[in-house]
Amino acid sequence: MTVEGLIFGRVRDSNYRLHSGKTQFWKHHCKAIYLGTKIQKMVDDQSYKVTDCTTPALPPPAYGQQSKNHVCSRCKRIMYPGGKNHKDNHSRNVCGDGVRQSPEKVHLVINGIARDFVEQPPPFPQPPDVFSDGNVFHPARFMQVVRTFYDRIVVNNNVPSALAMHDYAFAALLYDRTVIVPGLDGRPSKVLFKLFHSFKLAPGEAPVLDDYEGEMCLRMDCLSEPPLEALQQDVVADEPGSSDATA
């Protein structure tokens, strides 16, 4: 059950009691959750309420003719809390983090071998602006989040904060789609992020891509050992004519 569904049931039935008999907890939290204009009208309609929360459970007709509230299978949000074309409704096929709502079929050919499979969307909720319009991936923003996430969680060992849900979903995304290619012959390792086949890259960006076993990947040079970014800076510094080389 969704949070909204749980709250709606409590408000509809005027049932705010805990097992201890206290009601303050649920009364406070039921007021904190916005259910949307459509559901609020249903809540305000006395025909949907049981005024005495001690009344034994009654069959469904006693609670009024409640219509089914569709819930997004990905983000678990009520789809149409505000009625038709309301601004509070779930966007058509796109969740609040910019990712499409449902899986998508993919036809892929790698090394002459065709594969048909269903690609699942990344877990909800992803950090803002990494995905948009349901099927657009922004690699520059993604790399920015990767660096911030690594510094905050790994380097500084910060405890989860208000961003805990985003952190968990983003970590799950990285864990599922990251490939580490070991370095050989003195070359550094490469850390790659396997791109989604059902998402397109945002226009106007120039990500560093690499091929891995026939699949296109985004290079995360900041996570390689040693970091490729640092090595590239050292190479530039050692080139003849550079300020560091002539110092």
Image (cartoon, helix red, strand yellow):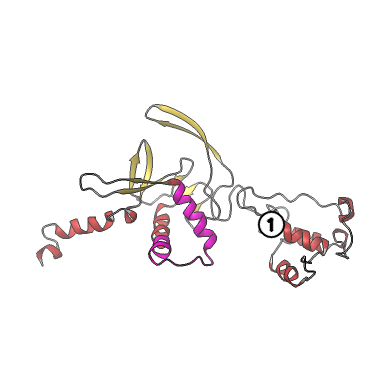
Q: How many marks?
A: 1
Q: Provide the major secondary structure of the magenta segment.
A: helix
Q: Position of residue 63 (x, y in %)?
A: 86, 55
- Residue 72, relative to residue 112: is it above or below? below
Judge from the rendering whether residue 177 lies leftward or rightward of residue 80; answer left or right.
left
Q: Is residue 117 among the parts visible in the rendering?
A: yes
Residue 130 at x, y = what percent?
A: 47, 55
Which residue is the extreme one toward the front?
20
Which region of the structure is painted magenta? Answer: 149-176
Residue at image point 14% right, 61% down: 242
User: Between residues 165 and 87, which one lies in front from this camera angle?
Assistant: 165
Identify the residue at image location x=20%, y=58%. 234
Q: Position of residue 155 (x, y in %)?
A: 38, 64
Query: Residue 111, how many percent across, how many down?
Result: 37, 29
Please say if 62 is above or below 31: above
Nearest to the observer: residue 166 or residue 24: 24
* Residue at figure coordinates x 78%, y 70% from the top left: 23
Which quarter of the rendered picture does the C terminus lie within?
bottom left
Check if residue 157 falls in the magenta segment. Answer: yes
Amino acid on which disc 1 is placed:
His
Which quadrant holds residue 28? bottom right
Query: Can I make out residue 128 in this image?
Result: no
Q: Residue at x 88, y 51 (%)?
A: 59
Circle 1 residues within 10 Å: few <14, some 14–19, many ≥20: some
Instruction: Residue 42: say if magenta.
Output: no
Give the vertical position of 78 relative to 210 (above or below). Answer: below
Q: Left or right of 185: which side holds 38? A: right
The residue wearing badge 1 is 86
